[in-house]
Amino acid sequence: MSAAELDLPRRDLIWAAFATRYAFRPSVVRFPGISEPAASVTWDLTALESRPELDRAGRITMIRSVPEGQGLYVLDWQHPCFWLDPARTPPRDWPLGVYPDGDYYIHITQDLSAGLFGHPWEKTLCAFGDAVLPHVAGLDKLMPRVRYGGQPLDA
């Protein structure tokens, strides 16, 4: 099974719902790009040594976070977006990795309650939602945490 591209009305609906729920504010200078929920962890991507390892860890995180029979939205800011079943879609068929390569990348559950938010200008990755947080060990091994629940760790 491969990812299915969302049609424009569906894509706009999902982005609008995400923007409302997480107060998404696209900007190259104001960070973070969302209101990070209390149940969230954010990492510094500048310390990352391997994008393929990040993509692999991100896919594993989402596969473990999405209940069987449910799907995942894979969103690329102002580009085609997709719907896939993470348990049945081989890694080679995932349309985007986790590293935000020039645009915001979001991997989010169908109910929009949990996912990964990659910020291309802040160079961060935020995992949010109770379904995702128990599965972030692989991400923790790759880069340091900078925020928990939207709060800086050094504060």
Image: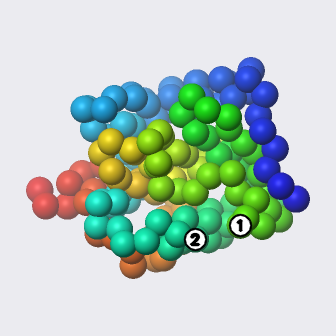
Amino acid residing under circle 2: Arg
Cα separation between marks 1 and 2: 8 Å
Question: Which one is in front, 5 or 12?
Answer: 5
Picture layout, residue 128 above or below residue 59: above
**Residue at screen point 78% across, 39% down:** 5
> Can you see residue 102?
yes
Question: Which one is in front, 74 or 101?
Answer: 101
Q: Position of residue 80 (x, y in %)?
A: 67, 34
Q: Position of residue 45 (x, y in %)?
A: 34, 60
Amino acid residing under circle 1: Pro
**Residue at screen point 70% across, 57% down:** 94
**Which element type, helix, strand or loop, lies under badge 2?**
helix
Q: Around disc 2, counting alpha carbons within 10 Å, would you say few (fewer than 14), some (14 to 19), or many (20 or more)?
A: some
**Which element type, helix, strand or loop, lies under badge 1?**
helix
**For residue 122, what is the image quadrant?**
top left
Q: Name the quarter where the N terminus is drawn.
A: bottom right
Is the residue under label 2 in contact with that under label 1 (CB below 8 Å)? yes
Mark 1 / mark 2, whichever is N-terminal: 2
| Residue identifier under label 1 | 91
Residue furthest to the top: 9
| Residue identifier under label 2 | 56
**For residue 68, what is the image quadrant?**
bottom right
